[in-house]
Structure formats: C-alpha cells, structure tokens
Amino acid sequence: MRFSHQSLSGLVLACAAVSVAAARDDATKPSIVLIMSDDQDRRLGSTDFQSVLHREIFSQGVEFVNHFATTAQCCPSRASFLRGQSAHNTNVTNVHAPGGNYDKWVQAGLDEEYLPHWLKKAGYKAEYVGKFLNGYNIINANITPKGWDHVDALLDPYTTYYNVPVMSQNGERPVYYQGFHSTDVVRTKALERLQSLVKGSEPYYLQIAPYAPHVQNDVHHTIPLARHMDLFPGISAPRTPNYNPDDEHQASKGGWPGTLPRMNETTQQTADKAFRYRAQALQGLDEIIEDVIAMLDANGKLDNTYVIYTSDNGYHIGQHRLPGGKALFYGEDTNLPFAVRGPGVPKNMTSQIPGVHLDLVPTFLDIAGLPEADWPSFLDGRSLLPQWKDPAGSSSGVGAGDGNSKETLNVEFWGSCTIEAPEGRELGAPFKNTTYKTLRMLGDRQSWLFAVWCTGQMELYDTAADPYELVNLAGKPEHEAVLSRLNALLLVTKSCAENTCRDPWAVFTPNNGTDEKVATMKEAMDTKYDAYFASFPRVHFASCMQYQDIANEQPFYPASAGTEKGLGFANRRPTDNFAFTTGGVAITDDNFHGTPEQRHATLEQVYAGARNLTDEELAAPAEPKKGGKGNGGDGAAEKRWGSRSCPSGLDLAMINTQIFLAHR
C-alpha cells in the first residue's frame, strides 16, 4: 500500500495525538509510595510510639487492623509480597538455604515476573531503596534485581549492622557509607529519588524499606539512631494475657514453644530493654514518613499519591514465653501494621476488613489501570482497592460472622528459626522442628486459628472468645465438628493457587453430581455435612523437613495440587542443587551514628565519607554454614562491578558459595 504525503502527515498527527492523550492519562494516574519496616509488631502497640504515622497516615486515611503476612519471616514474606503468591508457590520458604534467599529467587526465575515488570507495563516508573531480599549480598550484588528503573539496596552481611551501611546502586560495586546509620542513608537516598520522580511526568511506584526495627544479630536487639537513644525511659513490653503464661496454658502448645520454661526476671528485663530500643528505632521510620509527606505536599503530588505503611512480618516479645522473634503463626507474628492514605480513601477510619500481603500486587495493578487481561495468571490474591475506598461497606465481607473466603487466611512456615534474645541458645535455638501449616479464619462470630505442626501436634483456638490464643481446643470432642471443617479448608489452602487461594470453599462439593455448594463456615457447620467433612484425610507431615517437599506433605486437595502441575511449578524454574553466596564481615564500627546534625543530611554529606569496598573486604571469609547437603564452588565467572573487576584468578563465588541439594 502506498501513502500520499497528506495521508502520512495525517497519520503522524493522529499518532502524536494518541501519544499526547496517553501521556495525559499517565500523568493523571496515581503514584504509589510504600514504606515497609522490618519485623514490626501491631498487637504490642509499636505504632503508638509513632506520632507522625498517626498524624500523616492514620488520621488522613484508613488503618486496617486485620492485615496479615502469610509467612512470618522476612525473605519468604517479601518474596510473596513481590510475586503475589503464597510461599508454597514461590518455594522461597526461609531466609537461608535450603528454604530460600535471593540466590534461589534468581535461579527460580521469579525475578523475571514480579511487581516492577508489571507496573512498567502500565506506564509506571518503579524504584526501590533499602532492604530487598535476604541473601542479596556483597558477593552477588552485581546480579541486579530485575525490573526496577533504579534500585539501591542494603547488602548482607552488613544489612544487620546499622552503623556499617553497605549498599549497591543498580548492581554497581558495594559502597560503604562511613559515619552514618543505615536508616539515615536509606532516608536520604529515598528522598533524592522521590524528588526526581515527582519532577517527572510519569506515575511511579517507590518502595522505601529500611532495616529498622529488626534486631542487629550480634547484640540481639535493634540499634536506634543516636539522636533517639534517650527516648521513652522506663517503658516495658506489654504484659498481655499471653505474656509469659503459666504452665497450664503453655503445656497445651505444640512444637518447640511448648518446651520453653517461664521467662525469669533477667530475661524479662532484657525483653523490656529490647522493646524500648524498638520504640526508639521506629522514630527513624517516622522521620521517613514525615519527609516523604512533606516532599509530596511541597510538589503538589500528595493528593494523587497512595502512601502505604506496613511491615514484612510481625514480632513477639514475651508472648507464649518467647523472649523475642517471629516465624510463628500466632497473632503477634502475623498481624501487621497496615495503613493507607490516597485518592478516594476516607480519612481517620479503622477497618476490620481482612487482607494479606498477597493482595498488594493486584491492588497496585488495579491502581495502575493495567487491564486484568495483562495481569499474571498466577496471582493468589485479590485487589483491595474497593475496600480501601469503602472500608466500612459491604465489600468487607465482615459482619455476618460467616468466615467467608475473604476471611480465610493461610499461614505457613518451613525450616529452622531462632529466639532473637541473648538467651536463645540456652533455650535450645536454633530450632529445627518448626514446620507447620495454619488456617486463620477471621469473623465476628466464626473466628478460628487452626495449626498442624510437622510433629503431628495440633492447635485450635477460638480467637473470638480467646484473642490471645491461650486455650488449645484441639482434641476436645465438642470441637471435632469445627476441626473437621477447618482441616478440610487447610488441605486446600496449604496447596492453593490462584482462585483456590481467593475462594477455597469453591472446591467443596458435598453432594456429588449436584450443584450444591458450601460457601461459608456457617453453611458448612450444618450437621448434614458432618460425614462429608469428616471424610477428608487429616493434614500431616511424614517428617519434619527443612524445606518444602511434595512427598513429605501429602495429601493435597484437590489432588492435582500435589503434582508437578501444582505448587507454582508451572511459573518457576527448578532450584534443586542451587548455589548460594555469602559474604564475610571485614568492617566494624563501634560508634553510634544518626546524630541530631544528621537528621537532615544531604546526599552530598552521605557520600562525603563513602568508599567502595576493597577486593580484600569482598573476599573476607564468611561464617561457616551448617546443615547443608554439600558445599563447594559453582564455577561462576569472575564477578565484575562496573568498570572494576576482582583481581585475576580471584573467584569470589567459589570462595563463599555453598550448594544445597534436592530442595524443591
């Protein structure tokens, strides 16, 4: 076909008009800023110490008090958040091998299809500053997290050392920001990126992820900014009803918590000190919120930006005799701070609507206006945007006490975990028999927590009557009917994918050959279904393994979930025999940084004392790892950092690499 000059000109003008219209549409799309703390409790009142969070987000938006993590540990929770999938579908199930870390995330190909890629399809810029995934470290930092237009990430093993911040910007050689606290470095760098984004014409997603209030591993508590270290004298961990419970209640616990002695006075004093440090450390998060809101407001962008505050998982301090830590299914570990302000979100409201981190990817894609036909097919969550805009409306699904699908949450865990307190090793940590499957049902009158440990022990709590999860009802004949329904649901949720995660009731057909369905817990409790639900096999494990294994976790329901067609296999590559990298600590600093003078430090000041890590520092020996099924080099090519390379013949991957076998 031949075009005249006039027709070509018209075509050009038409295309230009479409481009202008598209640019105009993009310019009106809301932007998203997500601030994610690390290991922050909701049920112990940590947000009570954050006056800026209350002023700028709670009072200007909605606090959702029933938002949960589906795995109460950093790496698997963050991986699920970024992929919109349960941990049993990502197979990133712990913070280190064999369960998972950044190396496993990359080898599985999960980094090729996750949040930033999808947001960019919708015309958004996507940027990230702070902690990414556990195991992103000084050795593999050149394997840049894919999808981000800009990523500036904290690097292990220095992530845990607040006053030795080491980061990599877009996969470049690691840089040590000497003389600064990592919270200040993350804040300063995030504000510099935000300033650039608000000046641009594209909508954007910016995630700001400081390490606080996570413990610094070597001292078993967080390290606040120096300017906050005198705050909140005399405060102590809340003495909730489940704090350091008596023998009668503790004896009914399953797994390793049931073996713990009561906390003595010294342990309680240490826990109180840890709680105070956490309250102090959260002031650095408040400063991030304050500066982000101020910058958005000053640039006229605040009203068209969703600002979200949350954490990757919760935390306990003294509950169920646990001096400090997470990784359990109890409410303290899984119920997260979560609040949002933004376009269409009402002000100064509290909502009971349940949600999980799996729901945030579809929520963000909904905000971005990406057609659902372009959403990945494997998402396990649902968009929460209607609930954000109508937090008291019928979309909540709460109020009838039916325990409907919106209220049915899966919580799971694999691998070892520890007690994040000085007494941890004395109490038996790290613990190995920690794997479990859990179902949490939220409602006004049907509210339950049901857990099955890999040891075969079960826990069942009526959380409406027993919100502190103290009285284990498992094994009591009067609760067998409830347990049989929850067991059938858990068979589904422990292996669900896509729609079965969003609506696990949909798989049940009490009368084969008919259209009869059971859609709520209230309906399921009809006595005519007793035999049907009693016929389901009990959830159990063949043994306590440190990673997900199909044979070990049979049976599944539907049965196809326990095959190569289920558990996310179709959307990730195999990770058997994956190699993981670790770096050693070569830099220490006993000073406390984050002085009052650094409160408004500029990027130039942060960079003034910064330097690249040397080859010798990159090659520092890592702490020996235990529990592997083999170790050695992966034969990886020499690592390169921009124009700089490691010395000839020095293969960092071979120095600090281990291989774990057969961990699906």
Image (cartoon, rainbow, N blue to C red):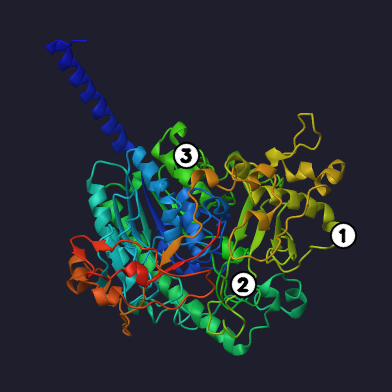
Three-letter amino acid code at disc 1? Pro
Label 3 crowd (10 A; few <14 / some 14-19 / many >=20): some
Question: Which residue is identified by label 1?
Answer: 477
Q: Nearer the viewer, residue 465 or 130?
A: 130
* Residue 9 in view (yes/no): yes
Q: Is residue 138 above or below residue 450?
A: below
The image quarter containing residue 153 is: bottom left
Q: Looking at this view, name the residue that lies furthest to the bottom.
A: 266
Residue 62 visible somewhere in the drawing: no
Q: What is the C-alpha distance between the residues marked 1 and 2?
A: 31 Å
Question: Who is closer to the viewer here, 34 or 455?
Answer: 455
* Three-letter amino acid code of the residue under disc 3: Pro
Q: Are marks 1 and 3 in contact (CB under 8 Å)?
A: no
Q: Position of residue 187 (x, y in %)?
A: 31, 64
Task: Look at the picture and state if 397 lies above or below 49.
Answer: above
Is the C terminus in the top left, top right, bottom left or bottom right quadrant?
Answer: bottom right
Q: Which residue is mark 2?
A: 432
Earlier-in-chain disc, 1 versus 3: 3
* Residue positioned 46% across, 31% down in the render: 373
In the rendered image, residue 646, in percent from the top left (x then y), is placed at 23, 68
Q: Secondary structure at mark 2?
A: loop
